[in-house]
Amino acid sequence: QVQLVESGGGLVQAGDSLRLSCAASVAASGRTFSSYGMGWFRQAPGKEREFVATIRKIGSSTFYADSVKGRFTMSRDNARNTVYLQMNSLKPEDTAVYYCGASSWDSSRAAHEYAHWGQGTQVTVSS
């Protein structure tokens, strides 16, 4: 079993920055954190969950949705079992609940390929 806990959300103004964290507990799964591809997704009210960013199991290769490319940066610290999402130049359309997910795939843009999810953290960007 993998437990994921997101933190760092909040209410900010357009143009501000936030850094989200996702701490993973993987001991019960019998696997190491580095054996999971990780992703960030978001869901706005009345909309489906959408892909934001993903990072490979080892190393720093990342992939982003076009809507956040150049503004968001995803990273991981396998020693700390944690992934991060640095969000700069935030826009009102970035308002959503942000979720991190763990996948057995090296990295994935597809939500259905993630078996484990956190509870989410709310990000609200005012204009």
Image: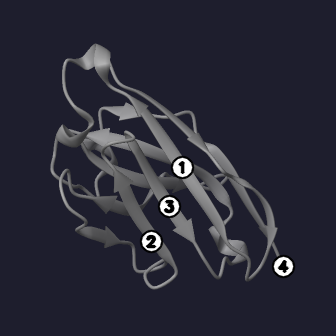
Q: CA distance from mark 2 to mark 3?
A: 6 Å
Residue 127 tag number:
4
Which of the marked residues, 1 or 2, is nearer the chain's N terminus? 1
Which of the marked residues, 3 or 4, is nearer the chain's N terminus? 3
Q: CA distance from mark 1 to mark 2?
A: 12 Å
Which residue position holds label 2?
A: 73
Quadrant housing residue 30: top left
Depth order, front residue of 30/115: 30
Amino acid under label 3?
Leu
Mark 2 touching mark 3, by CB under 8 A? yes
Which residue position holds label 1?
A: 21
Amino acid under label 1?
Ser
The quadrant of the picture occupied by the C terminus is bottom right
The quadrant of the picture occupied by the N terminus is top left
Q: CA distance from mark 4 to mark 1?
A: 24 Å
Quadrant housing residue 58: bottom left
Q: Secondary structure at mark 1?
A: strand
Q: Position of residue 73 (x, y in %)?
A: 45, 71
Q: Nearer the viewer, mark 4 or mark 2?
A: 2
Which residue position holds label 3?
A: 85
Quadrant housing residue 52: bottom left
Neighbor class of circle 4 (other Cα within 10 Å; few <14, some 14-19, many 20+) is few
